Amino acid sequence: MGYRPDPFLSGLAAYRQSQRPQKFRSTIAWFDHWQEPVQLRKAFRLFEGIWRGASQAAVRLGYHLEDIRWPETGATKKIEGILHAQGIHGILIPPHRGTIDWGNFKWHKFALVRIGGTMETPRSNLITSDWFGGAKMAVSRIHQYGYRRIGLVAGRAFEERFGGNNYAGFCWAQHKLGLDPALPVLLTDFVHTNPEIMDQQKSALQQWLLEQKPDAILTTDAEIPGLIQMLGYRIPEDIAVAGTNILDIPVDAGINQVPELIGKTALETLVKQINLNERGEPPDPIKILVRPRWQDGRSLPPLNTVPQLEAD
């Protein structure tokens, strides 16, 4: 009959609905396919923050977020049965390592959202941090604080999982700021179960420090601050250090990846898909980047009076 919704009335209805206490609607699944499930939220504070943001958003919207542990093999039918029995229509998939074998799981029955860029399957809309923008922001802030020999120490496997975004953001910031010299990136391969490799990585770090003489380092590795001190350098007196994830790297200066906001955005995106009956793997998935923040700390103090900082 040619009816068109009135956007002002739709907005009013949405506002009135948001002011009402939300009744319980359904459960949303959080898939945990880690070999040691406790690692996902307890060993990594970043993941715990994502869970907390998603869980709080779920309650606000009338849902309950449930951690569903996926056994290593032969669990597809069992998991599908659990979701069917609980009337679950939405699935959040947090970051995982490596390639995940989901079997022949029937994704077309569910609304899907992945968190983090570490997996390629299932094909779904994706919510992740802006790692490229965060690295660029961090180098600019370190430069504004008076440091000139700025280096990046990054885990090779980490960069491969996240598309080299820290590496790329760092190099672009070097170019934009005209850093001279532009220190080469040190890529690391820490394997804690192999003492020989750990010694090799320690030697590579020592050689890089002696050759490049950085006055500040941005790192993705939790091991780097401790190794720097083991090699006889003081933080921050000899070398200032900032982390790309201050929650899981033992320094207090660097990038806050705002995990609660990532979890909140992912949950809200999933609920929208549930309400619009968008199921399965979309033909053209979207990616939403959440902007991180810089956090000051004692591990990277300003060297002099800090000028008015540019917008990050």
Image (tube, rainbow, N blue to C red):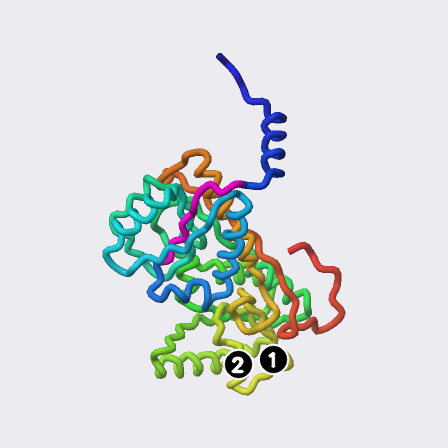
Q: Which residue is mark 2?
A: 228
Of label 1 and label 2, which has the lower sequence position?
2
Residue at point 41%, 52% (across, down): 30
Quadrant of the snapshot with the C terminus: bottom right
Q: For the stretch drawn in magenta, what is the main secondary structure?
A: strand
Task: Note whether 137 is above or below 18 in the view shown.
Answer: below
Q: Residues within 10 Å of mark 1 (few under 14, many from 20)?
A: some
Circles 1 and 2: CB atoms closer than 8 Å: yes
Instruction: Left or right? Give the position of 61 relative to 115.
Output: right
The amino acid at mark 1 is: Ile
- Decide whether residue 228 is among the magenta residues: no
Please name the amino acid that badge 2 sits on. Answer: Ile
Q: Residue furthest left?
A: 74
Q: What number is the disc on residue 15?
A: none
Q: Nearer the viewer, residue 210 or 308?
A: 308
Point 58% across, 73% down: residue: 251
Q: Magenta region: which residues?
A: 23-32
Label 1, on which residue? 235
Tell me the element at label 1. Answer: loop
